[in-house]
Amino acid sequence: MRYWLMKSEPDEASIDDALAAQGKTIAWTGVRNYQARNFMRDDMRIGDGVLFYHSSCAEPGIAGLAEVASAAYPDPTQFDRKSPYYDPKSDQENPRWLLVDVKAMRKTRLIGLSELREQSQLEDMIILRRGNRLSITPVTPAEWNFIVNKLIPKKT
DNA sequence: GCCAACGTTGGC
DNA sequence: GCCAACGTTGGC
């Protein structure tokens, strides 16, 4: 069992959207970074824990908990000419981009970036490193446990 | 809208 | 294989 942090722009897919989706499961479309793709392809397993992170928005931070709900499979948006994620250089026989399905478990209070940065237990989190842009990053069990057990239950 | 940081591209 | 130019990410 591994743990991950996955960034989503809430304008596109928020934790509320995911919870409202059929089966609470959404296809994690639009990953166009090889390192993030490789995490999905090589390291993710069904049932892995996911911190659902809202990025590029007014209040960036962890907004919910989710689970990996499928193995990696080709992202259909790479073949859709009308999609912003269309990739003319990918071909059907050998798709370049993959996705996994993600099942939303529950919404949490918003744990903002600044609050995350205040936690000495989280100082090594990849998401908090300077210049980090990876949309999918591994989370250590210690980081996961601290966030889920110590931060999330706390009231603001 | 700004811009630092980073990943990708492509000429050589 | 190097690396400058370019495009993107994402917080502010």
Image (cartoon, coloured by chain):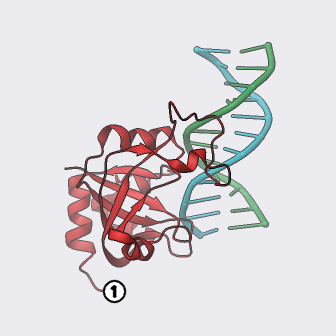
Chain colours: A red, B green, C cyan
Horizontal side, residue A36 vs residue A48: left or right: right
* A64 is higher (above) or lower (below) than A85: below
Give the residue drawn at x 40%, y 70%: A18
Which image quarter: residue A22? Answer: bottom left
Residue lying farthest to the bottom in this orientation: A156
Circle 1 residues within 10 Å: few <14, some 14–19, many ≥20: few
Judging by the rendered image, the residue that carries numbered circle 1 is A156
Q: Is residue A64 visible?
A: no
Task: List x then y, in percent, for residue A149.
Answer: 19, 70
Front-lying residue, C2 or A63 = A63
**Residue at 63% from the left image edge and 34% from the top image edge:** A89
Q: Amino acid at mark 1?
A: Thr
A16 versus C7 height, above or below: below
A7 shown above or below A109 = above
Q: Horizontal placement of A103 versus C9: left or right? A: left
Most extreme residue toward the front, as rendered? A93
A97 horizontally vs A24: left or right: right
Mark 1 secondary-structure assignment: loop
Relative image position of residue A122 (x, y in whole percent): 31, 59
Residue A70 is situated, as x and y percent measured from the top left of the image, at 31, 51
* Residue nearest the observer in this picture, A130 or A127: A127
Image quadrant where residue C7 sits: top right
- Image quarter hosting the C terminus of chain A: bottom left
